[in-house]
Amino acid sequence: MNVSERIKTRRSACGFTQDQLAARVGVTRVAVSHWERGGAEPKGRYLNDLAEALGVTVDWLLTGNGADISSHQQVPGFHNVEPAVIPQGKRIPVISYVQAGNWREMCEQATTFDGNVEYVSASIDIGPRGFGLWLRGNSMTPIFNEGDLVIVDPDESPRPGDYVVAKNGSEGATFKKFRPRGIDENGQEVFELVPLNDDYPSMHSDRQHIEIIGVMVEHRIFRKRVTGR
C-alpha cells in the first residue's frame, strides 16, 4: 500500500469518517480527502497528529514499516513523543482582508510583492493561488480565534461544512462556514455563510451578492503564554 491507501485503510479500521478524522487532526475534510486520494501527503505537525489519531507511527504511515502506537502505550514509561517531521512546503503569502477581497484580481502579481509581505509554508499541497490569512474578531469562536492563521486554496470548490473566505460586496473579505441551501428558480446554487458565534448573523447568497474566494485547507493555532498574572 502507498501512503494514501494506508491512511484510508487505517481510518476505516478505526471507524472514523473523514470529518471525524479531520477534527482530530485539526484540518478540514478537504485535506483528509486530498490525502486519501493521493493528491497530497500530510506534512509537518499534521503528519504527527494524523499518526497519533490513527494509532500508528509516522514511519508506518510513510513506509508501512514500524509498529502501531497502541502496542507501545502498554509499556510503562514509554515516551509519548517522537521527532517531528517538518518538510518544507510551498511558500505562500499572508495577505490582508482587503487583499483577500480582491485576490482573484491581484493574485497574478504575488511574485512582485515587496519585502514587507509575510510568507509561510503550507503543510499540504495547495494550488498556485493559495494564501494565508490571520483571523480577526470573534465571529468564529470557539473553534477559530483572533490570531489564528488559516491557509486558503482558491482552486478548491466548497462542500457542505467547509470553511471559506468570501467577498460580501464590500472591499474586504469574511471567513465563515459554508452551508448550501439548494438551487433557485434560475438554476443558481443558494448558500449561506454561517458564523459559529450565535451573536453574529448569517449571510445569504439569495439576499446579497457573495463571491467565494477560496476554501480553508489548513488551520494553525498559536498559543501564547500570558505573563504577569
Image: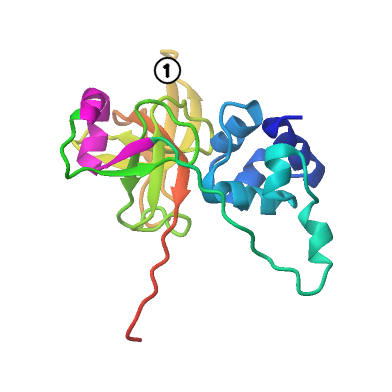
Number of numbered tags placed on the structure image: 1
Residue tagged 1: 188
Q: Position of residue 166 (x, y in %)?
A: 33, 35
Circle 1 packing at 10 Å, graded few (<14), some (14-19), many (20+), is few
The quadrant of the image that shows the N terminus is: top right
The secondary structure that most of the magenta stretch takes on is helix
Residue at the spot x=38%, y=55% of the render?
148
Residue 79 to residue 98: above or below: below
Q: Quadrant of residue 171?
A: top left
- What span is in magenta? 91-111
In the shown orientation, is residue 114 left or right of residue 70? left
Give the left or right position of residue 108, taking residue 147 as reference.
left
In the foreground, 103 or 35: 35
Amino acid on which disc 1 is placed = Gln
Residue in the picture at 68% in, 32% down: 4
Near-viewer residue (102 or 167): 102
Q: Farthest residue toward the top? A: 186
